Image: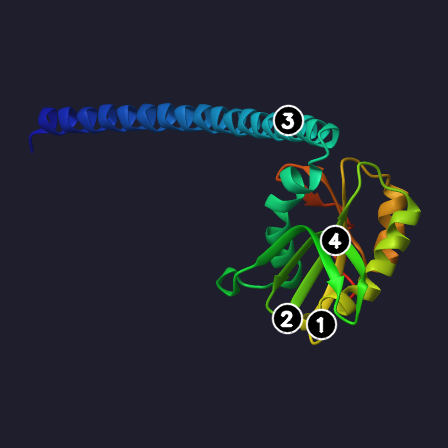
Amino acid sequence: MNIPLMDKRVKSLEEMMADLMATVENTSRIAAQTSIEMREFKEEMKDFKDEMRREHRNLNRQLGEIANKQGRMTEDLVAPSICRILQEVVDCPPSYGCGLVVRIRKVNPKARNRTREFDAIAECGDYVLVNETKSSLAPVDIDKLMDTIAIVREYFPEYKDRKIIGSLATLYVDESLVKYASRKGIIVLAVGEELMDIVNEPGFKPAEF
């Protein structure tokens, strides 16, 4: 038996094991450092995204204030958002298409001497959304919208078999007014990340008239 040769092989094996352990230890150290760096990166990205959202909301508010001064809130803020909001709320698929009219003046078909202007009306599938836009919102505006919804079918007889829902759009809104509108089943829109966002509480379902 060649003992020196076996000793040499054992020593070589021990060296290989030592190298392997060192490699494993180094790999573990690198993995741990990478994990820390990834967590830090994710936190930085989250902070960056949050900051971008804040900046986006601030920009939209500034646009909203400019549109309000020019009397173009409905055209510049509400109109680009209203179909998206209607489709989200009633789950109307984009394939249905969404019709939208802004600042339309209608003559009452049964009383030709009566006319009425509507801020924005969108329709998708079985649903029609009647929107009024206000620079600032008050409880009386919610009640007035309810009155407007009640006469929509008089001016749009083609909607007689449609489900009508209502929304109020504004720049800023007090939480108490959101709660009041929600009790009435009215959607409240305010300037947010996507021009106009729904600000009713989670789980809110609009009333159908």
Q: Residue 167 placed where, x, y %?
A: 76, 53
Query: Pointer 1: what residue?
Result: 157
Residues at marks 3 and 2 touching, judged by CB atoms closer than 8 Å: no
Observer-nearest residue: 199 or 86? 86
Residues at marks 1 and 4 touching, judged by CB atoms closer than 8 Å: no
Disc on res. 126: 2
Question: In the rendered image, is residue 134 in sight?
Answer: yes
Q: Quadrant of the N terminus?
A: top left
The residue sitting at 69% across, 70% down in the picture is 159
Instruction: Name the kind of residue labelled 2 in the image.
Output: Asp
Q: In which quarter of the image is the C terminus?
A: bottom right
The earlier-in-sequence mark between 2 and 4 is 4
The Cα–Cα distance between marks 3 and 4, rounded to whole angstroms, is 28 Å
Outermost residue on the left side: it is 2
Element on which disc 2 rests: loop
Q: Residue 81 placed where, x, y %?
A: 62, 46
Observer-nearest residue: 31 or 113? 113
Query: Pointer 4: what residue?
Result: 118
The Cα–Cα distance between marks 1 and 3, rounded to whole angstroms, is 40 Å
Task: Name the side, left or right, on which 6 lies relative to 179.
Answer: left
Task: Name the side, left or right, on which 207 lies relative to 67.
Answer: right
Element on which disc 3 rests: helix
Element on which disc 1 rests: helix
Disc on res. 59: 3
Residues at marks 3 and 4 touching, judged by CB atoms closer than 8 Å: no
On screen, 54 above or below 104? above
